Amino acid sequence: MTAPQFVNAAVVHVDTTANASPIATDAYAVSGSGHTLIAVIDHERANASSPLAITGIARGAQSFTRANKGDLGSSATVDVADMWVLENAATGSAPLSVSHNGVTGSDIQIAVIEYDAGSPGAVSTPAYAPGSSAACATFDIDVPADARLVYLQVVTAAGCTWGSPSHGAARLTAAVGSGASGGAMGVADHAPGEAQTLTGICYPFTPASGSWSNGSNHVVGLILQGAAAGSLAPAGARSGHTAGSPLPGVADITPTLSRPPGGGDIDVGATVITGGSTTTPTIALFGDPEMNANIPGSKWEGFYATVDLKEAGRSPTFTLDFANWRQSTPPASNRLYWRYGSTIGDMSAWVPFDSRSVSGSLLTFAKTGAFAEAVIQIANIPPVPYAELEAWLTTWDANAHMCRPAACAALGVSASAPNKYAYYDFPDLVSPDGIAVGDTYAFAFGITDASASGPKTRLFHTWTHAGEWGGLRAMLRFAERLMSVDDADHDSLRSAFEHVFLITNTAGMVGGMARGVAEAGDVGDDPNRAWGSNAINRSDVADPILSIEASVALLVAEWGVNAASLLNCAGQIAWHSHTFSGAQFGTYKDGASGAESAFIANVETLYGTSLHNYSSSSTGSSTAFARAGTVGGFGITFEWSYAFADFLSEIGASVDTIGPALADTYQDGWFGAALSPAAAVQSMQSGPAALTPWLAPAGAAHVQQSSAAALSLAGQIAAASCRHSQHVAASTLTAAGLVRGAGASMPHRAARPVLSTGLIPPALSGAVLRVRPDSRVLGVGAA
């Protein structure tokens, strides 16, 4: 058997600013089947606190595996050598996709070396020589028979002059940038034909400056085996490896931290890692709260980071310092969460760390037992990154009950939007911490039973705070159950309701925007304080946020307004979350209307305890807008606190009560159709008899004059002109399930009061009117 043979070498990418991840290189054509590719990279690490780090390389459906990499050495300005291997590369021409941690502004060049075969075996210990040493970094290695050594030298000097390789043949030289401030790389290989011990391996050079002031350099190498041949354990390596598998060098096994899109408030540069070469490293994490003048104080919601442990089987301990965040000590029961890199994209894959302790401002947490994979993600609130939200929409699009609001298309979002539920295109901006935010859209989707005839109660649901991923998770869970659960409650919520869900701050899901929205002049503004009080007249919104304006416009385009400029719907439910440690599940009870109080009471009955009261909803919030700007005037905001160990379980347990409670509230008579037809005229008589309304719609066959004796609260309502015949005390409803009288316009659950003690909803020919005890009309609509 012979050593793998050299085929070709080519530079496929050169860039002085390390363009945004992933980098798309020029295409490289593989000339034959079974060939092995080695991607060699020379990139600058000029920013020691937040250096560029390559995280993956793909060629079509195939992925490279890192084989060897130079460490930082003693200088923050040295270029870094990086080698990745792809066996059995697909033939034909295709570019490489090179992912990195998002740091831009560094020199980088990428080349491909092709061999006719070969599996990676042993690797060299990375060698580094600073510019002041007037030396070329070298390494020693044993090369087996029928194997080839491939080595890469990188230099912090673009204009260097290359000599002859110490061993074997030169295969490629390249430069990026200019003069002493750039970088250069050279690749050579050597196949001795028999087992040999090689010493002083390097690709010598003379730096551009004529001295060694810019001669900092790395050299790394790997052995391509003609065939797998037992176990290899190079000197200095941490553990033995089987030939054909990648071998990390000693300096390459220290864990690294990166901030993925949507990474929340994590300060990657401040991370401190101790014991990085052991199986039990300690990783100290620090928050990076967003400051702005529009919301008092430091605003943080959560962090979210990717940790590359470099090897499976490691058991790290994490610490998280709360000293500079909203509260100075960790929440009493808060646990952090993790998921494996292989499950990225699965919103349900997060698992709580099962070991925690608190000392002052420091939270210490760990997982019992070692991690089975090298890459994990950690978060203090299991996030919903933008890409995973898009994937959720794509998955549920197949459900028969999901529909696109017509206004999504009517608002003119560009055809390049990622899917049909987009209605607002966020501008491309940079977050306060320098992360590019762009190519994100706000989304709206509807849920209803399209086959159900007759008028429907309209509700919109809002999620507006980036970083409050608990609220978004709760809303998506409610939507999932609304689309998938088949029982009387959810059937009623689909057939009698039309739901529109607004996800209005998706730009804040990219780059750690906390609660802020990425708009010019509004980075850091709270998007739940700009809803105003009228769907048409927006003059009371002092600082409009464009995504919120688009949200209101979408609702107006979808449902229209009545003569009083009130949005033709019953109102809204808002979904939020935060760090408050005094309650797991709560709402804003102060100022609630009769319908809202009835709904809250139904939730509490099913939940089994009273909800925490956060007092009143804020002026300018979506709830305040719903109360002032809709026909129904119904507005509720729910809050989930992630300061509890069972945060994810709590979302499930509480959300699952909301649907049935909403159905109960509807069946109790609190929601009208909320269509407000132009032909109907509403009026309300004041005084002690106000609970029995006066309805005079155009063309109505009867006019009911309010009087104490007109309808008895304790009696039977069963007039020939009425379409609703039930007993107030509900004593006649004893059968299990739902009871529907002939022609009844409203179903009721057996053994539940059909009419609340303060409500008489008489139904006349062609119209249904429902009034709540606080004398506000919820809605008028055709029966």
Image: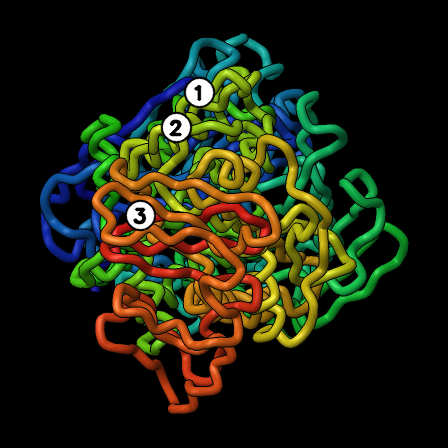
Are the residues tagged 1 and 2 within 8 Å (C-beta)? yes
Residue at the spot x=21%, y=44% of the render? 699
Amino acid type for the residue under numbered disc 2? Ser
Residue marked by disc 3: 445
727 vs 276, nearest the viewer: 727
Q: Nearer the viewer, mark 1 or mark 3?
A: 1
Q: Residue furthest bottom?
A: 735
Q: Quadrant of residue 239?
A: bottom right
Which disc, if any, is residue 565? Answer: 2
User: Is residue 390 placed above or below 129 in the rendered structure?
Assistant: below
* Image position of 324 (left or right of 57): right
User: Is residue 334 placed above or below 565 in the rendered structure?
Assistant: below
Amino acid type for the residue under numbered disc 3? Phe
Label 2 secondary element: loop
Q: Nearer the viewer, mark 1 or mark 2?
A: 2
Residue at the spot x=84%, y=45% of the render? 328
* Image position of 460 (left or right of 406): right
- Neighbours of disc 3 within 10 Å: few (<14), some (14-19), many (20+): many
* Image position of 347 (left or right of 439): right
Image quadrant containing the C terminus: bottom left
